[in-house]
Amino acid sequence: MRDAPRVRERDEDDLAACVGVLDTVHRADGYPTIWPDDPAAWLGPGADGRAWVAERAGRIVGHVALVRPAADDVAPTLLRHGPTAPLAVSRLFVDPAARGLRVGALLLARAADAAHAEGARTVLDVVTTDRAAIALYERLGWTFLGTGRQRWAPGTSVAVRCYAAPAASRSLPRETP
């Protein structure tokens, strides 16, 4: 399918387009909850520079990064893990115009595959009010770990639901050639 979304590594030239999509998502859905002073810096490089974009018809329609969790992140503390610490999905968003095209599923699969290649499991948290994201994670077989309060900024904490990727990354959707 010519217009099917594809996922590739993000590069520096993608940041302006990613910020544009992020702005659209923020206006439509309120994500991120707190708009960053410097959205391009907020997108960050991900753990060891691992971040990906989804493209459709030559246009960026989604983004995800994989990061090493901070010491106060809730999701990793709820996951019993082996010798390799979990990695966290971060900065996941999909352009509202591209929803329903499996973009979110493809981005999550890419992040989970990268973590799996390191012997790590992928975790994430989502605000308890984001029903669409919660439905996506559960439809894709992510395991609900529990709830908690996540601090996102000084003096700001939010209620979150925490999830772990399926143990076998092969159960996640793949791109079609």
Image: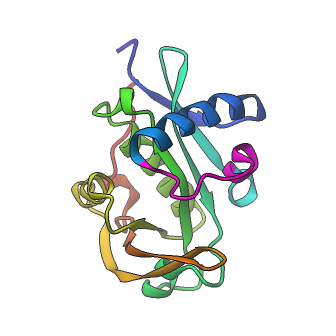
> Dividing the image into 4 quarters, which one contains the C terminus?
top left
Residue at 67% in and 53% down: 36
* Nearer the observer, 6 or 148: 148
Q: Is residue 125 above or below residue 59?
A: below
Can the viewer see residue 47?
A: yes
Residue 156 among magenta residues? no
> Dividing the image into 4 quarters, which one contains the N terminus?
top left
Q: Quadrant of residue 5?
A: top left
x, y percent for residue 95: 44, 33
Q: Quadrant of residue 59?
A: top right
* Nearer the observer, 47 or 113: 47
x, y percent for residue 126: 41, 65
In this picture, which residue range is highlighted in magenta?
A: 30-43
Q: Is residue 155 above or below residue 120?
A: below
Can the viewer see residue 80?
A: no
Q: Is residue 83 above or below residue 165?
A: below
Residue at 75% in and 28% down: 13
Residue 39 among magenta residues? yes
Please tell me whether the stretch drawn in magenta is mainly helix, strand or loop. loop
